[in-house]
Image (cartoon, grey):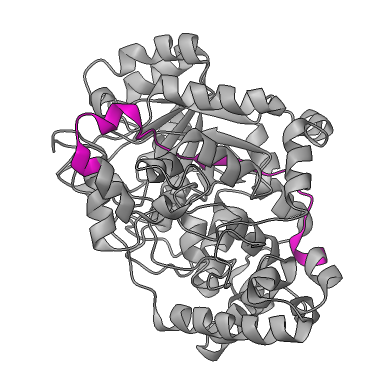
Amino acid sequence: MRFRHDPDGARLPIKVDTTTNGEFAPRPLDKSARAANALASEKAGEHAKRAGLSRRSFLTSTCGAASTLLAFNEAHAAAGKTGGFFDIPQVAALERAAADASLAGQEFIFDIQGHHVNPLERWRAPSMFTAMGLKFMPQSRCDYLDPDSEWGHMKCFTGQAFAKEMFLDSDTDIAVLTFTPTSYEDMPLTDDEAAATRELVQAMDGNHRLLVHGRVVPNIDGDIDRMAELKEQWDVSAWKTYTQASVDGSEGWWLDDENYGAPLIEMARQTGVNVICIHKGLPLPVAFMTKDNRLYGGCRDVGKAAKENPDIDFIIYHSGYDIKDKDGPFEPGDHRIGVDSLIQSLVENEIPPNSNVYAELGTTWRYLMRDPQEAAHVMGKLLQYVGENRVVWGTDSIWYGSPQDQIQAFRTFQIAPEFREQYGYPEITPQLRAKIFGLNATKPYRVSADVVQEYLGSDMVARERENYRNAPDPTFLTYGPRTRREFLDLLRLKGHS
């Protein structure tokens, strides 16, 4: 059989579904998103027949992705959502050259938010139930790593799966492997395991393709004191922290408070790693949440901390995005949560665009793909107020499987001229897209994009990717929880009930 995965072509190449990154419960699709998926599936059959291909062959081509995005445009326009769209010519649904021109870009792509876990030996022994519970996760269906073994499904969560999904099934050039806000005893991916994945990628002749974070939860005793050791032992490229995280249900903390924020910033400065990545926005599950989860996920502290510490780069993961609220244009006010809380904090503290605050798009863009009109507002606001040089790419994968669909959707996304005129949003030009995809992140992570592009174009990973794409077989699966049951199984996986 030519295709091992989804031979009947039931899965769309652009994944718009209820999957989460495991930090919040799944949210149902609205009517227009459901209609978009239905129309895309219908069009795939029609276009495959016209092209003389099987559904699966058609969907693995760039024409398949183009057909899907064009169907999304049609469904959203029918629902009156025209503020943002995927800018693809109609002919791309059937003509490979036109599809490639829109979707097969050559940008340098630097994904600064990647995840995987290590559920093999360490978690198998203490909890047979947890190990079996993983079978209910979509990721367990990857079926390319020892699928016939009793524990084969667990290998879908490992560094090998991460390397395949990120570096073969997507156009990602460099990635950052990051962490969740557990105690050290409960970490689903430890520092040494993350370093092992980095070595795995380097063994593929990937050189500097994978960087790692140092996880810091300052309201856990001893975490700040360990930062120097983490830097020395694991050569971390930035710090990852969560202001709304707590392992005992206590209060969260702020970047500008004296108990946790100030000591964390000072220790980052002392280590010489002056980049702090802060989860903001997406509410955490009960297992990690503070007494006021959504409030501490707000960004009211960001502007003050940035103003007082101009030598520190603050990267706001998820851009403060709150999935419970729909975003519109920014209006000054008392914004305590969401993207507007980030913008309000910058405005109040007179932080101009393109300063020392960055907005990261992991999961945020994945959710905005459901609604291009909301995407136009969020992207437009971030580019206006955070700055065209300070919006950075992240995908939160492999929780969402290969990030290639996120890449293809963003390659074609455009803010409608009417919105640009009405709200002052910029046009998403190829130059601006290239900045967001990778060039903007090279400054805080101290990566020379010119050098990277020069040698990554011919390394072993790049050659393997090119060979693989002569006969690609992507899974088109999302690997995070899609139902409440799967979400609760993931919490048990992380050591919480």
Image x and y of residue 419, in percent: 61, 75
> As drawn, is 383 to the left or to the right of 92?
left
Image x and y of residue 262, in percent: 34, 23
Residue at 30% in and 55% down = 136
Residue 4 belongs to the span the image colors magenta: no
Residue found at the far bottom of this picture:
78
Q: Dividing the image into 4 quarters, which one contains the C terminus?
A: top left
Relative to 85, say whether 323 is above or below: above
Relative to 248, say whether 184 is above or below: above
Q: Nearer the viewer, residue 467 or 86?
A: 467
Residue at 67% in and 65% down = 60
Q: Quadrant of residue 415?
A: bottom right
Image x and y of residue 249, in percent: 13, 38
Q: Which residues are magenta?
A: 101-130
Residue 104 belongs to the span the image colors magenta: yes
Relative to 444, say whether 405 is above or below: below
Residue at 52% in and 65% down = 15
Q: Dividing the image into 4 quarters, which one contains the N terminus?
A: bottom right
Relative to 140, say whether 313 is above or below: above
> As drawn, is 367 to the left or to the right of 466?
left
Q: Quadrant of residue 4?
A: bottom right
Image x and y of residue 208, in percent: 67, 26
Residue 65 visible: no
> As drawn, is 350 to the left or to the right of 457?
left
> As drawn, is 51 to the left or to the right of 42?
right
Residue at 53% in and 69% down = 11
Q: Nearer the viewer, residue 132 or 455?
A: 132
Q: Nearer the viewer, residue 103 or 135?
A: 135
Residue 462 visible: yes
